[in-house]
Image (cartoon, rainbow, N blue to C red):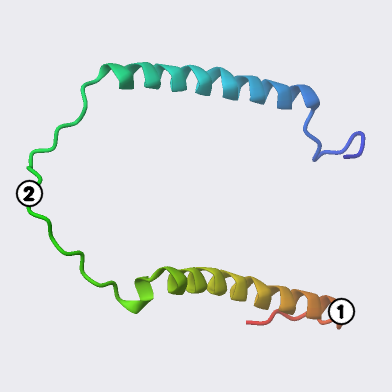
Amino acid sequence: VLKGSGDAVPFMRMVELVVIWFGVSSPLVFAGAFIGYKVDAIEFPVRVSSIAREVPQQPFYLRTYTTIAFCGLLPFGACFMELVFVLSSMWMEHTTTYL
């Protein structure tokens, strides 16, 4: 950050914001924890049956490895394609946007 820059945030202003943040959030956390421990536990209005039941078979798209593959490949593929477009436009000196 350059001296006299209009985009610079003064150091004391950042310190003030941190003090305000912790001065408000910390007491609220402790107050919420104090109130939460004093309240009785929630009792649900239904009973649990003592009869054991079979867990149904999961469909293929809800299995662990399939979910890991889809949840990892889709975001990675999107980021990879955007990165390819940005870097190719920088290296090849294109000024157009790919859609």
State the residue at coordinates (65%, 25%): 17
Circles 2 and 1, Cβ within 8 Å, touching? The answer is no
Q: Nearer the viewer, residue 59 or 28?
A: 59
- Secondary structure under the numbered disc 2 in the rendered image: loop
Q: Provide the residue designation for mark 2.
A: 49
Task: Tell me if mark 1 has few (under 14), some (14-19) or many (20+) residues whose alpha carbon lies within 10 angstroms of its own.
Answer: few
Residue drawn at point x = 90 percent, y = 34 percent:
4
Residue 11, quarter of the rendered image: top right
Q: Quadrant of the N terminus?
A: top right
In the foreground, 79 or 4: 79
Counting from the top left corner in percent of width and height, residue 75 is at 56, 69
Q: Residue 29, located in which quarter of the rendered image?
A: top left
Q: Position of residue 5 (x, y in %)?
A: 87, 38
Is 66 on the left-hand or right-hand side of 8? left
- What is the three-letter code of the residue carrying label 2? Ser
Q: Which amino acid, mark 1?
A: Trp
Q: Earlier in the sequence, mark 2 or mark 1?
A: 2
Quadrant that contains the C terminus = bottom right
x then y, percent, for residue 90:
84, 76
Which residue matches tag 1?
A: 91
The tally of labels here is: 2
Residue toward you, 3 or 29 = 29
* Residue 64 falls left or right of residue 90: left
C-alpha separation, residue under disc 2 versus residue under disc 1: 65 Å
Q: Is residue 78 above or below residue 55?
A: below
